[in-house]
Image (tube, rainbow, N blue to C red):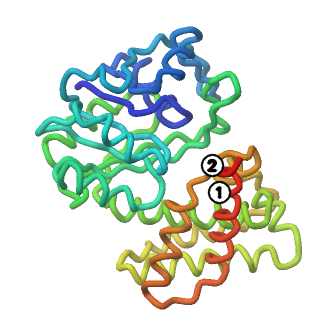
Amino acid sequence: MGILIVGAGSTGGYFGGRLAEAGRDVTFLVRPARAAQLRAKGLQILSPHGDVTLTPKLVTAGEIDGPYDAILLTVKGFALAAALDDIAPAVGPDSMILPVLNGMRHVDQIVARFGREALVGCVAKIATMLDDDGRVVQFNKLQDLAYGEMNGARSARIEALDRAMQGAGFDARLSDAIEREMWEKWILLATIGGVTTLMRGAIGEIEAVPGGVGFALALLDEVIAVVTAEGHPPSEPFVTGARAAVTQKGSPLTSSMYRDLMKGRPVEVDQILGDLSARARRLHMKTPLLAAATVNLLVHQNRVAAA
């Protein structure tokens, strides 16, 4: 199975690197600057599961000469439009596009461009970052990649994908409810992102101050209410786990938006918080904490754009 990893950042670099290390047929589609860095230094992964340096197979935009069986899309939401242009030559009639993006807006964009049959649901759970030397750094042992047909079917192609993913050095899981899992991940990302960026601290730091727990749970309730009103209520076990995650005493947990914010980088506010806020407005719902978190990051985003 030919696999194209779109992006070799913290997520694509990790999962694509582990697949390549396991001997899968993996190619990375990257920008010229990242290609030069990877050719000079290799794809370096620093992980509790073992460090590795690989010499990856690379292509840049315009160098793709045919379709791939599976395309793992790991770019930031604000880079999606350009990425869809770049992968067009890689998408054949039987190609599967697996988006590892935040929020759900990208689903409609992929379907509009390549059709509903091309889309396969995907959820990645991993804590990684790209350091200043371009190395993929994994913070803890969590490394879960779930995938499945959006309608829950056990198709021949999804079972072939599952066989390729198994035994590749991370926890691979074929899900019969991947669409629900995608919405649930959005709930958690939006809540943790909103809480940590608005309060400028980790979950444990916020829990430790008066009102911190109440604030975190109230924002979680707002996000769940919007998603439920959209017709995608989360499961009770998920809600229980999410409430524990956003109020855990001493937790060092932050969000990628928080880390990008603190480094003065662009953040995925439109995809993670902005889209939820827009849905709440369309539904005439009052979500003051979600709105505040969104405005906070939009101010930051404008400041970054003006710099």
**Neighbour class for label 2 at 10 Å: few (<14), some, many (≥20)?**
some
**Neighbour class for label 1 at 10 Å: few (<14), some, many (≥20)?**
some
* Relative depth, front residue between 192 and 23: 192
Residue located at (25% from left, 58% from top):
150
* Residue 63, percent from left and from top: 30, 20
Label 2 is placed on what type of residue? Answer: Pro
Label 1 is placed on what type of residue? Answer: Gln
Which residue position holds label 2? 266
Residue located at (70% from left, 27% from top):
132
Query: The residue tagged with tag 2: helix, strand or loop?
Result: loop
* Relative depth, front residue between 216 and 34: 34
* Residue 45, percent from left and from top: 59, 23
Residue located at (79% from left, 66% from top):
199
* Relative depth, front residue between 35 and 239: 35
Residue located at (88% from left, 71% from top):
209
Q: Do the residues labelled 1 and 2 touch (CB within 8 Å)?
A: yes
Task: In the displayed orientation, state which residue is furthest to the right.
Answer: 209
Which residue position holds label 1? 301
Query: The residue tagged with tag 1: helix, strand or loop?
Result: helix
Position of 272 compared to 154: left or right?
A: right
Position of 156 compared to 158: left or right?
A: left
Q: For the residues marked 1 and 2, what is the alpha-carbon distance in whole angstroms?
A: 6 Å
Instruction: Give above or below for 91 relative to 213.
Output: above
Position of 302 compared to 99: left or right?
A: right
Q: In which quarter of the image is residue 203?
A: bottom right
Q: Is residue 216 visible?
A: yes
